[in-house]
Amino acid sequence: MKKMLIPLLGLAVVVSCGTTKTSEGASAQSSSVANADKAFLSAYKTIKADELKKNLYVIASDEMEGRDTGSPGQKKAGEYMINYYKNLGITPPKALGSYYQKVPAEFMKKRGGGNLPDSENILAFIEGSEKPEEIVVVSAHYDHVGTKNGVVYNGADDDGSGTVAVMQIAKAFQEAKKAGKGPKRSILFLHVTGEEHGLFGSEYYTSNPIFPLANTVVDLNIDMIGRDDVENRGKQYVYVIGSEMLSSQLKVINEAANKKTNNLELNYKYDDPADPEQLYYRSDHYNFAKNNVPVAFFFDGIHEDYHKPTDDPEKIDYPLLEKRTQLVFATAWEIANRTERIVVDKK
């Protein structure tokens, strides 16, 4: 997650705060999750802690040299991810013709990126069976802060955890597709670069979208979901940020999915416009929100190893990472398969 605060840009924010495990009316929503759809359950069960752990020990290994934007280590991590998608039979978007979307150095430099080299977003895609033109985005940044004074900052939680969660969610959707129950809407699995330096990869994508933003239904963004913070130590929880900023339906859908799965404590602390951290503006979902795309940002909090060389894979709570990943999958499944596209009815 980006460390520096982003200006509020005068946006109006009307939200609720605190924690909850469900919303009034959530159970009334027609939901494939609520109906315990067999295809959903089969796919859901493929999201496993041991597979998340296996991938994270690679993504957050010393070999990846902290995955700084455009670095050889980041490119190695990208190659690993692409091979993972190839092995699953998940292809890049046809319109792109590659898993890579180049993010030019010049683009980043103009936005304060200094002398960063060219880098790449990585995109994998499953086409929808009934409404392929409507796109559900599941995103995470795969860069981190690199190596400092010879010490590797592995970024296991930030954002190795989000990276492997997106990979596992993609596998779950692909398993459903192989069983003849692929998503009705298309799913874009978007791994963005340059987040730590200024949300550059997501800004580049939303400035140069492979699919029209008008057809983009939602961005479910995952940035740090493998640990806990001091305030919630030992709890089964996740922060959800921004889920009611633009759509009255997204928060309800997410809460219904949560209630019918692991029933985590959903914490809305960071939706408070007076919160000093202003996290709504500090990860990649924000570039979608600026373009009127509903977003939900899943986050575990700011813990003692945030942006330190001690953010290592052995400190991840893998059972909790599994549950949070399953929640994002369940939410994406419902949005991808419901009859009507979720509304954008807030500003």
Image (spheres, grey):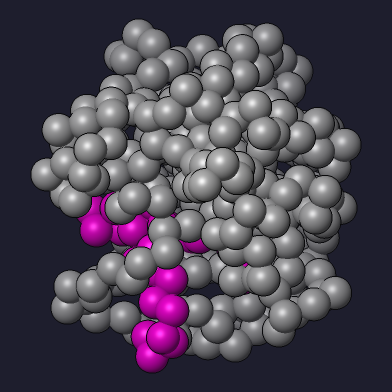
| Name of the residue lying farthest toward the left | 110
Residue 211 image offset from top left, x and y in percent: 29, 29
Query: Residue at the spot x=50%, y=42% of the render?
Result: 146
Query: Residue at the spot x=43%, y=87% of the render?
Result: 275
Q: Which residues are magenta?
A: 273-301
Query: Residue at the spot x=19%, y=51% of the render?
Result: 112
| In this picture, residue 332 sits left or right of residue 187 | right
Q: Verify whether residue 297 appears in magenta.
A: yes
Residue 222 image offset from top left, x and y in percent: 55, 51
Query: Residue at the spot x=23%, y=72% of the render?
Result: 7
In-front residue for pair 7/179: 7
| In this picture, residue 156 sits left or right of residue 341 | right
Q: Verify whether residue 107 appears in magenta.
A: no
In-front residue for pair 67/251: 67
| In this picture, residue 203 sits left or right of residue 23 | left
281 vs 200: above or below: below
